[in-house]
Amino acid sequence: MSNKVNDRSVDSDGSQNKAAEHAVSQLLRNNLREATANAHRALDHHPILSPLLRSPLSTEAYILALRALHGPQSALETMLYGFAPREAFPGRAADLERDLARLDVKPYPVLVTVPRATDYATKMGAMYVIEGSNLGGQVIARQLAQTLSPELPRDFFGRAEGYARWERFWEFAMQYLAEDNIAKASEMAVDVFDFYRAHLNSVLQHTPIPD
Ligand code: HEM
């Protein structure tokens, strides 16, 4: 595997051009956001996820979403294991597993192909998707506070860290992403969103949507 593309420790004169770095970061962020906008929309409008923002929300619809989200969350965390520091980016599958155990339900198995990350660009593309899901997770957590029975467990959404973690992610990402590999990372990110959707569709084939 090649070296980090933006290793700051080898900066030639030891100084950093903050403004230029910021501009590149914005370019890369926009690139990923624009490349995945349609795929994100398809996912947040998916019949398994869209009820999470509706009021009222049935317990069955909430549980179905949790059972369906576990497969991709866990598959992607396994794929990225060891890539990013655990202290800064703790896995979230354990929170989801705790919710499922308390609800006494099992996750749906993954029956579709998981995209493979083979280098820094593809790993970053996959990590972008899984880290970004925390932003939506925080929005969902706020909604659940209004719509979900208080006794139901909600660690997965409730412990999503939102923008502080998102900024940490971008700090980390800038060591690996650059203009010459952003297209590859974006392609992977779209594949990962498509993988989520394919998995949710496969869940739908086995389970009717609850009211
Ligand atoms: C009902 C489900 C979802 C809702 C309501 C939702 C909502 C949101 C919101 C509000 C943002 C922040 C947008 C901004 O501040 O610019 C966001 C960002 C993001 N979400 Fe979601 N999301 C959902 C599901 C997901 C899922 C399942 C994934 C991943 C598989 C995901 C990946 C992302 C990513 C990568 C971003 C960052 C976009 C960027 O580059 O700025 N989201 N989402």
Image (cartoon, helix red, strand yellow):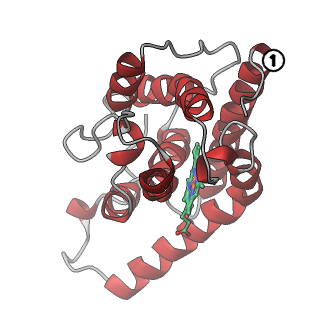
Query: Foreground: 14 or 184?
Result: 184
The image shows residue 15, relative to residue 31, as above or below, that is: below
The secondary structure type at the circle numbered 1 is: helix
Q: Can you say whether 187 is above or below 66 in the image?
A: below
Residue 132 relative to residue 94: left or right: right
Left or right: 17 in relation to 189: left
- Out of 189 and 150, give the one closest to the viewer: 150
Compared with 27, 79 (above or below) is above
Tell me what residue is drawn at x 54 percent, y 28 percent.
Answer: 63
Where is mark 1, residue-wise? Answer: 205
Instruction: Give the x, y percent position of residue 24.
Output: 49, 75
Return the residue found at the far right: 205
Q: Quadrant of the N terminus?
A: top left
Is the CB of mark 1 within 8 Å of ligand 1?
no
Q: What's the amino acid at mark 1?
A: Gln
Viewer can see residue 134 = yes
The one nearer the camera, 12 or 80, is 80
8 or 80: which is nearer to us?
Answer: 80
| Quarter residue 210 falls in | top right
Figure quadrant of the C terminus: top right
Q: Residue 191 in the image: state x and y as whole percent.
A: 70, 38
Ligand 1 positioned in quadrant: bottom right
The number of numbered discs placed on residues in the rendered structure image is 1
What residue do we see at 63% from left, 23% from top? 114
Q: Residue 97, percent across and down?
A: 38, 22
On screen, 38 above or below 199? Answer: below
The spot of residue 179 in percent (x, y) is: 57, 64
Quick check: can you spot residue 181?
no
Label 1, residues with CA under 10 Å away: few <14, some 14-19, many ≥20? few
In this rendering, would 59 be left or right of 111?
left
